[in-house]
Image (spheres, grey):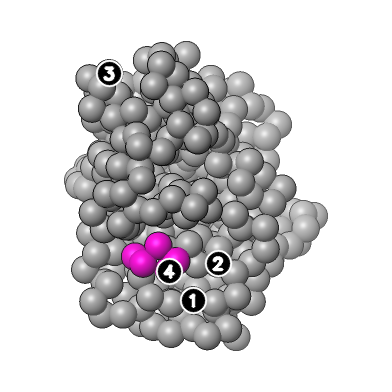
């Protein structure tokens, strides 16, 4: 698996036009469906003088892997840094709809997974977005029916769900299958393992009905399956150096970054302070994230799902850029996209400015930053 950074970026090329429709429809880090929640969420009242914009529109998913956004919203960390500039929130179920919203100007900044960030950047010929920070690592597991699958080798011949064709977990499973020496057609999902693309919202029901034997999924879906009697056969963290890999990034529309750098910096300050608070107050942060999930979706997670799910996620300011590089390489190897040109996808200067001011170590763009 990704013990070192991939080398294919030395021979970068643009994403093939033929591959774009596939990725536009499928690339999402950990989405729940494909439609956005049309209702914008306003945080606590803005106080003080507005920055260079009257408001900033922030998008995120209703997933625990987007815990920084959930907690930052619920606790008011973003609004405090934004002062008189109003923070407005929109909740998404999948990466493609959030990228569309960013491109259309419906949101300015978003929490999103690596696959849609890569797709959005390459499809726009490097003009739509920048990754400006990290947010989360981990939180992805292979959960199986222990009556049918008792070892990793038993996965061969079984039906394993992933959220969407070409999404981050789908690519990870396909790469793991290849590492095992097994063969699967990436597009059809047919082969030595049957890869069944299933919306995370219905994966638990598919598991209960027996139509799948397991799933490679993000939290909280993984813990929902465990609550239904599933067993964690593999934690994806164990496949990565230092047990870290990017699951959630922060992106910004390039035109918004250029026009309102002070607003972007304020949001990043809020993110850094949120992550620090999460680490210092893990139980309170978990409760805060669940409270915001309940507000956004109308339903909180039960304790037997929330506790193990939250524990498996590490919140981090570091975008773990070298792992984005490797994840893109896995998609190339799976045949889901051609070699992308990711040069310039990162602009970490605003984040590093915030980190320096906070007395924290700066982060690296793995050679994929703006020049």
- Sooner in the amino-acid sequence: mark 4 or mark 1: 4
In the structure shown, which secondary structural element does the residue marked by tag 4 occupy? helix
Give left or right: position of 19 versus 366. left
Residue at left offset 40%, top offset 62%: 334
User: Which label was assigned to residue 332?
Assistant: 4
- Confirm or deny contact between disc 2 and disc 3 (CB under 8 A): no
Mark closest to the chain's N terminus, 2 or 3: 3
Residue 230 at x, y percent in the picture: 42, 19
Q: Are marks 2 and 1 in contact (CB under 8 Å)?
A: yes
Q: CA distance from mark 2 to mark 3?
A: 36 Å
What x and y, as percent, mark residue 29?
Answer: 40, 50
Vertical relation: 77 (above or below) 210? below
Instruction: Say which label, 2 or 4, has the lower sequence index.
Output: 2
Q: Secondary structure at mark 1?
A: loop
Q: Quadrant of the C terminus?
A: bottom right
Q: Which residue is mark 2?
A: 325
Q: What residue sits 37% from the left and 60% below the top?
A: 116
Magenta stretch? 332-336
Residue at 47 percent across and 70 percent down: it is: 130
Nearest the viewer among 184 and 266 is: 184
Cα distance, mark 2 to mark 4? Answer: 11 Å
Q: Residues within 10 Å of mark 3 (few under 14, many from 20)?
A: some
* Residue 208, numbered circle: 3
Q: Which residue position is annotated with label 1?
A: 342
């Amino acid at each position: 698996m990704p013990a070192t950074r991939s080398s294919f970026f030395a021979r970068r090329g643009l994403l093939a036009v033929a591959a774009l429709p596939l990725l536009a429809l499928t690339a999402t880090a950990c989405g729940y469906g494909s439609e956005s929640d049309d209702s914008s969420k306003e945080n606590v009242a803005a106080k003080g003088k507005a920055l260079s914009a009257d408001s900033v529109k922030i998008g995120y998913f209703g997933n625990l892997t987007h815990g920084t956004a959930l907690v930052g919203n619920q606790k008011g960390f973003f609004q405090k840094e934004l002062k008189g500039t109003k923070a407005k929130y929109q909740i998404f179920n999948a990466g493609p709809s959030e990228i569309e919203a960013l491109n259309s100007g419906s949101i300015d900044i978003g929490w999103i997974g690596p696959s849609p960030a890569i797709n959005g950047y390459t499809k726009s010929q490097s003009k739509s977005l920048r990754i400006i920070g990290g947010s989360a690592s981990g939180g992805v597991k292979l959960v199986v029916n222990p009556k049918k699958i008792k070892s990793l080798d038993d996965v061969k011949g079984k039906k394993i769900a992933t959220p969407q064709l070409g999404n981050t977990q789908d690519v990870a499973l396909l790469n793991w299958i290849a590492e095992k020496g097994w063969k699967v057609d990436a597009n059809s999902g047919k082969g030595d393992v049957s890869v069944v693309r299933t919306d995370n919202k219905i994966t638990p029901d598919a598991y209960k009905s027996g139509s799948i034997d397991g799933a490679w999924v993000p939290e909280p879906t993984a813990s929902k399956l465990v609550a239904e009697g599933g067993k964690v056969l593999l934690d994806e963290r164990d496949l990565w150096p230092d047990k870290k890999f990017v699951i959630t990034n922060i992106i910004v529309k390039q035109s918004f970054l250029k026009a309102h750098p002070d607003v972007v910096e304020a949001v990043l300050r809020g993110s850094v302070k949120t992550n620090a608070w999460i680490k210092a107050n893990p139980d309170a942060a978990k409760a805060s994230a669940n409270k915001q999930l309940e507000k956004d979706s109308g339903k909180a997670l039960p304790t037997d799902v929330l506790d193990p799910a939250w524990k498996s996620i590490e919140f981090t300011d570091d975008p773990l850029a070298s792992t984005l590089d490797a994840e893109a390489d896995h998609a190339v190897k799976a045949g889901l996209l051609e070699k992308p040109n990711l040069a310039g996808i990162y602009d970490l200067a605003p984040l590093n400015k915030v980190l320096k001011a906070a007395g924290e170590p700066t982060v690296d763009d793995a050679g994929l930053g703006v020049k």
